[in-house]
Amino acid sequence: MIERTAVATTAAPVEDAGGASPSLGERIVGTSVGDRVYVAAITAFALAVPALLGLVFLEVARAGWPALRTFGFGFLTTSAWDPVQGHFGAAPAIFGTLVTSIVALVLATPLAVGVAIFLSEYSPRWLRQPVGFLVDLLAAIPSVVYGLWGIFVLVPLLRVHVMPFLRDTLHLGVLPLFQGPAYGPSMLAASLILAIMVLPYISSVSREVLLAVPRSQREAALALGATRWETIQKAVVPYARSGIIGGIILGLGRALGETMAVTMLIGNTHTISASLFAPGYTMASLIANEFSEASGDLHLSALMAVGLVLLVITLIVNGVARWLVWRVGQRAGVGAR
Amino acid sequence: MSVTTRVVLGVGVIAAIAACTGSDQKGAAGGTAVAQTSSSVDLNGAGATFPYPIYSKWFSDYATSTGVKINYQSIGSGGGIRQLSEQTVDFGASDSPMKDDEMTNAKGGAVMHFPTVLGAVVLTYNVAGLTAPLKLSGPVIADIYLGRITKWNDTRIATLNSGVKLPATDILVVHRSEGSGTTFIFSDYLATVSPTWAKAPGRGKELQWPVGIGAKGNEAVSGQVKQTPGAIGYVELAYAKQNKMAYASVQNAAGKFVEPTVESVTAAADGAIAKLPANTDYRVSIVNAGGANSYPISSFTWLLVYRNQGDAAKAKKLKDFMKWAFSTGEQSAASLDYAPLPATLAQRLTARIDSIGGGATP
């Protein structure tokens, strides 16, 4: 399910780059009334989705405006979040959202792409289906279940074994990234759970894209005397690169917006710390935590403003990603077709 | 796991689901959405999640004995107040009294507060080698949560627990991450006993916590405390009892260390109401109440109703139910680990119900 839509969306700009298809107007010239009604209907459907996004944007912006007007640019750069006194600054939540998402991608991408390459290139046919299915199944687990698993399994594991091992045994404690006491709930715990959660998205998309690489591409490389590894590295992966990046972006979108599991594991503290062992906050968990009992209009508005910032960051990230996919497609001639 | 625990947990899950859907609904226009008033439901209410298990038992018992059906959505105290203000429900429920500006903004006129049952907040901890409950005092708890006391063997904790060997470990402070009535009661208490706390962070359902880790819900707080040596956290009494957690005795205003029990919480209400004037609106905090046996971190939870009811028939149903709740209902409170109101208070409140106006034809 997920992989189909994802492939379709990420592949679209690549095809557009080719740009030889006739325009919509040319296609419907001289067709019957039924066709025209049909085209009108699906056009309306297609336009409804951007319109909906626009309305959401406007509504969130309108609700968040009082807070943004009160705190100005400081809303993005200060870290006091005091519902009692009415001071709101979202910097820690913005920081936490970006850090956990990026760390999650750094951890998940090699694993997910590795799984995809194994399944599409090396795996025997009988293994491909079950393993692929199980990886996809990770996407079907409700996030509250991930959160509970995190609380009862992952966090104790981190606190008792992983964190002391990283900090003391490997002496990584000299880096600011791995300093401080190991409580368990931390940006590291949140990043790890996010990595597991985005893995199936990246992996499924990558697998489908790799499987879609034409046989001739592989055969040509092999015929030139390339080893299997060289074939994958030089012929297959570059061909699928834009699709794989699309999958990573899909995973990033998921990581940025994930709420429940992160809320349960991140420690929910408004601090900016260089250490992954420290607790933090994300924008989505901040809204989830405080929305239902928000005290006063300014508080509610501040939460909506956080929602707006999250929306804008997501849009920027997706925009950059699209551009990246397009650039990769342009440069690597093979990918662009 | 006993059957009652399962039932309570089940109810909790339902409450949580209801809370989720509820918060979604009110997002759009500050409480216009409410369950469709089907003809079979006589009264609609919304509000606090904390008293939901006992309220839901009351509504079910009351429906069985009288046939009057009451629909209650546990969407949180804030949502309850908002929906009452918008007059989309017949009554609201809240763990903290409405503020003055909330009272003036209510569209249906004067709102009356009726305490229904009592809850308490207990401090749970994970300290190795303790045989008796830890003893704590208000100022010490405040300084732990302010980050001024950071070790378990701090002299101020040791003085309260003479003869107990406390470890030299760091204290990990755990608090609720989401807005909650539990946090309000706890911070109300700390602000009462500590002038520093009163200045900042102050009282609220959400605070700017000076130290510690935020965990979502009673479950996550207790989970974090159980797992982490040296941790301290606060949860509702009912939750702590049902999960057999260790909790501290707290020094009350009379200087005695009192264990939180249903009786000591009722005693706190007794101690507090002794000082109330006859014309009180019951928007009162009972933390740090007087009386030798009072547990100091106790609070009412309130039912919110308009003084002037628009609909005479509904007003009668509501008043009848409240009278039933203050007599028959109170008796079942303790079975769900809620502290019942002191008998004298229940009588005073029953008399007060008559001052609710029943609309055009009373």
Image (cartoon, coloured by chain):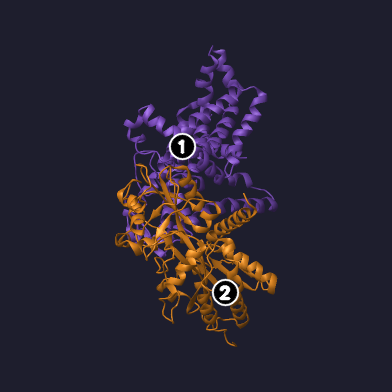
The residue carrying mark 1 is A104
Q: Position of residue A1 (x, y in %)?
A: 63, 40
Q: Position of residue A243 (x, y in %)?
A: 53, 33
The residue carrying pointer 2 sits among few (fewer than 14), some (14 to 19) or many (20 or more) residues within 10 Å by Cα, namely many
The residue carrying mark 2 is B326
Closest to the observer: A114 or B164?
B164
Q: Hey, which quadrant is residue A320 in on the image?
A: top left
B360 w.r.t. B303: above or below? below
**Please, what is the three-letter code of the amino acid marked with disc 1?**
Ala
Q: Position of residue A301 (x, y in %)?
A: 41, 60
Circle 2 — which element? helix
Q: Position of residue B96 (x, y in %)?
A: 45, 67
> Can residue A224 be seen by looking at this rendering?
yes
Q: Which mark is residue B116?
A: none
Q: Which chain shows up in orange?
A: B
- The answer to whether dots 2 and 1 both sit on one chain is no
Q: Which chain shows up in purple?
A: A
